[in-house]
Image (cartoon, rainbow, N blue to C red):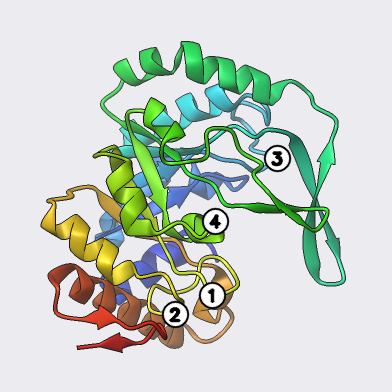
Amino acid sequence: YGTERCFDLAARAGFDGVEVMVDGRWDTRQAAYLRAIAARTGQAVVAVHSPFSLATPGWPPFGDEAGRICASVALAEEVGASVVVHHLPERVNYFPVALGGRQFLVPRPGDGRNTRYRRWLDEDYAAAQEQTAVLLCIENMPARRILGRRTDASVWNTPEAMTRFPNVTLDTTHLATWGVDASEAYARFGGRVRHVHLSNYLHREHRRPETGWVRLDLLLARMAAEGYDGAISLELHPDALDAGRDDAHIVGLLRHSLAVCREWAAGTATMDRAGSVSR
């Protein structure tokens, strides 16, 4: 869906704001346009996600992760977002291949971009953070299937290793691909969590919060009790929202997910082992 339509859906469902993923579409990375949509819909841009698409015309090229993050910071400053989300560096380069309706990741020869990115994170990341009030929040990544086998395609991809970074985006469905409990991971990050990508896991990533086996009720209750004051983005796969159905149906699903999350945070509802909500 287009950027403006997504803002409209969020407003109709009752959200407080939107996280914008920068990609190849100009609508995702022109500050004046995003400010106009935000003003019209009442949806603040609370976070900007640095791009990982191959083509982002007019921005630093694919492979210049540091340049893309810094450009995302500049955009965040212009639209009033307090967070820039970015990914951990990869161990190897890979490219997606579709076969029989499924997508597989196939390794490709290295081009040095991950080495450059790791060096920047080690040597220049702290200085980049000092130059802006926007928080750089690095995101934990999922287990990957490469040639059919589960592997870790990312460097520093454990709560313990990620404590090298001051600010973290905690992604709950990514944790679930490793079988890591979200509440325990939140505690192990030790207060570094400044942004959250919230979704459940049920054999696939990015399911609606109330659909899956991850105890997100316990996580949200704990975060509320401990005074978490950052943003929480519902990051849902289009098929989890029945994309393609009429907008009223999609708004209804979003509104229900949002209400359940708010109840969990308030402690007025819980989730049982089957993934259903009880009040």
| Residue in view at x 45 percent, y 61 percent | 235
Which residue type does callout 1 highlight? Answer: Leu
Residues at marks 3 and 1 touching, judged by CB atoms closer than 8 Å: no
- Image coordinates of residue 205 in percent, x first then y, are 55, 65
Q: Secondary structure at mark 4?
A: loop
User: Which residue is tagged 4?
Assistant: 178
Estimate how packed mark 2 is, as few (under 14), some (14 to 19) or many (20 or more) residues with alpha carbons within 10 Å: some
Real-space CA distance between mark 1 and mark 2, rounded to the nearest whole angstrom = 7 Å
- Image coordinates of residue 188 in percent, x first then y, are 32, 43
Sequence-wise first label, 1 or 4: 4
Which residue type does callout 3 highlight? Answer: Leu
Above-or-below relation of 183 to 87: below
User: Which residue is tagged 3?
Assistant: 54
Sequence-wise first label, 3 or 2: 3
User: Which residue is tagged 1?
Assistant: 202
- Which mark identifies residue 190? none
Which residue type does callout 2 highlight? Answer: Thr
Q: Left or right of 136: which side holds 14?
A: left
Q: Secondary structure at mark 2?
A: loop
Q: Secondary structure at mark 3?
A: loop
Q: Looking at the image, which is closer to me, 30 or 264?
A: 264
Residues at marks 3 and 4 touching, judged by CB atoms closer than 8 Å: no
